[in-house]
Image: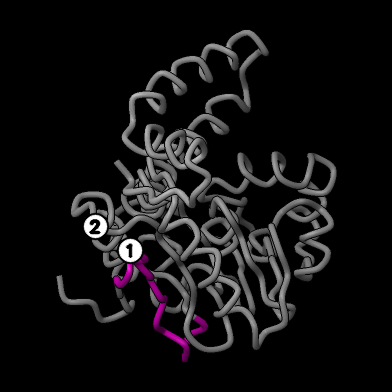
Amino acid sequence: MTYTHILFDEADGIATITLNRPQALNALHIGVISEMIDAVDRVRDEGTARVLVLTGAGRAFCSGADLAGGGAGGGAARSGPPDAGAVLESHFNPLLERLFALPVPFITAVNGAAAGAGCSYALAGDIVIAAKSAYFLQAFVNIGLVPDVGSTWLLPRLAGRARAQAMMMLGERIPAETAADWGMVYKVVDDADLAAATRAVAEKLAKGPTKSYALIRQGIRDCLDKTLSEGLMVERRNQLQAGRSADFIEGVSAFLQKRPAQFTGK
């Protein structure tokens, strides 16, 4: 696929998707989501990237669905009543599920606004690094809709029910540093340092035990709604897989030989 709305780059084991509609604050429509799905599938299927970074060009990460461009999926061309959920089922949600199911770590570098669906994709990162100018916004109530693209599942788990519910019902901007205090992001850095800080984390992950990372990211999500006993069984199954990896053998060997490990992601 030829990309018109995103940039895709892969180097040194780091794949980067950059939303590239700065004139529209990287607002999302079906074309953008289709390209993102194709790029994420490349990362999943080609197996050469060991970490994925998602960011936005210009002064915003992503302002959410492109209302002017039909991104809300109201279905102007559909017969009968509009279905604002149709595009979620066909495009937005499949992208989110692909990001969660990736076999490699996923970092989001949040520059400027992360609103609506953009907020969901930003907070879906395993590691979320935000510029000080960034903010997070659930503005669905302002147009009479409800939060979507996983927001009602994700936000209460990150910020707690009370904060998530107020954020969604009041439609207020949450500045990056408040988001860090609430547990929504890993780190806040100066705007000028966002690219370098993201690169440093990505390089570390790209050299790490990729299978272990995949099991960690899936294990955490598997255990969110389980009992302690069920969570222990998830860990037991994941440890079986991790213990059979080449990276485990290398990690132990490096520890015993008192040298840095050279992980291959296998």
Label 2 neighbour load within 10 Å: few <14, some 14-19, many 20+: some
N-term mark: 1 or 2: 1
Q: Which numbered circle lies on residue 81?
A: none
Q: Residue at x 56, y 61 (%)?
A: 122
Task: Check residue 37 for magenta coloring.
Answer: no
In the picture shown, does residue 66 fall above or below 127?
Answer: below
The quarter in which the C terminus is drawn is top left
Give the left or right position of residue 45, taking residue 136 as reference: left
In the picture shown, does residue 126 fall above or below 187?
Answer: above
Q: Residue furthest top?
A: 229
Query: Which residues fall within the magenta stretch?
Result: 10-25
Q: Give the residue at mark 2.
A: 48
Quote the CA–CA distance across marks 1 and 2.
6 Å
Question: Who is closer to the viewer here, 241 or 184?
Answer: 241
Location of residue 226 (image quadrant):
top right
Dot 1: what SS?
loop
Q: Residue at x 51, y 39 (%)?
A: 255
Task: Check residue 14 for magenta coloring.
Answer: yes
Give the colour scheme of this rendering: one colour
Question: Who is closer to the viewer here, 129 or 260?
Answer: 260
Tell me which amino acid carries mark 2.
Thr
Give percent across and percent down for residue 223.
Answer: 59, 24
Q: Which numbered circle lies on residue 13?
A: 1
Give the left or right position of residue 152, taking residue 171 as reference: left
Give percent across and percent down for residue 205.
Answer: 47, 56
